[in-house]
Image (cartoon, grey):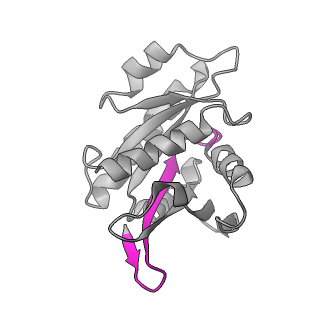
Amino acid sequence: MHIDHQKNEIVFKIVYYGPGLSGKTTNLEYVHSQLDPGLCGDLISLKTSEGRTLFFDFLHLELGRIQGKKPRFHLYTTAGQARYAASRQVVLQGTDSLVFVVDSQRGRLADNFASLKELQNRLTQNGVAITQLPWLIQYNKRDLPMAEDVAVLERKLNIWEVPYIEAIAVTGRGVFLTLRKAIELIIKK
């Protein structure tokens, strides 16, 4: 979180993290497409040799003021593929809340687990314990025929017992519920 005194805003950073092709980008694209263009910035794709990061910000007027300031949220995705690990480290710096996007397909359990373990390690390298950060899990792709049971995903991946949301990012199901929960966790903290 940082305070922009010039704009009288308090700015929070939410990062969508998870394995490649889990739906992080789809989440951000859906949110951006549904927001009032007057309240959000452009969807920016930062392409570097270390991968692609999507970013946009939006002003959340419905929350009212926090300590007399308007809340603004910066939303980021991280490139999920293994070769982009270094860029994920940078994107995680200064995170106020995190959404771990799980690909619910049975064949992706190992990828999800590896990404979650990497997340924990990267946060530790940034001086943050995963238990200190407000975060939740989004079980995405719930509509696919090979989607694992949520009870199995919970048992295997959610060892911290953080909140979770079931989603189908391509249709928008659960996408705003996930974002609202991430914001709620920030405000609660």
Q: Who's the residue at 56% across and 16% down the image?
A: 148
Residue 147: x and y in percent read 62, 18
Residue 158: in magenta span: no
Q: Quadrant of residue 104?
A: top right
Residue 12: in magenta span: yes
Judge from the rendering whether residue 16 lies leftward or rightward of residue 45; answer left or right: left
Q: Quadrant of residue 76?
A: bottom right
* Residue 143 or residue 58, whichever sits in front: 58
Q: Who's the residue at 34% across and 46% down the image?
A: 134
Q: Relative to 33, does residue 13 appear above or below in the rendering?
A: below
Q: Is residue 18 visible?
A: no
Q: Who's the residue at 69% across and 20% down the image?
A: 143
Judge from the rendering whether residue 58 lies leftward or rightward of residue 13; answer left or right: right
* Residue 86 or residue 104, whichever sits in front: 104
Q: Quadrant of residue 107?
A: top right
Q: Relative to 158, does residue 17 appear above or below in the rendering?
A: below
Residue 72: x and y in percent read 50, 65
Q: Is residue 27 visible?
A: yes
Quarter occupied by the N terminus = bottom left
Region of the chain picked out in magenta, as a range = 2-23
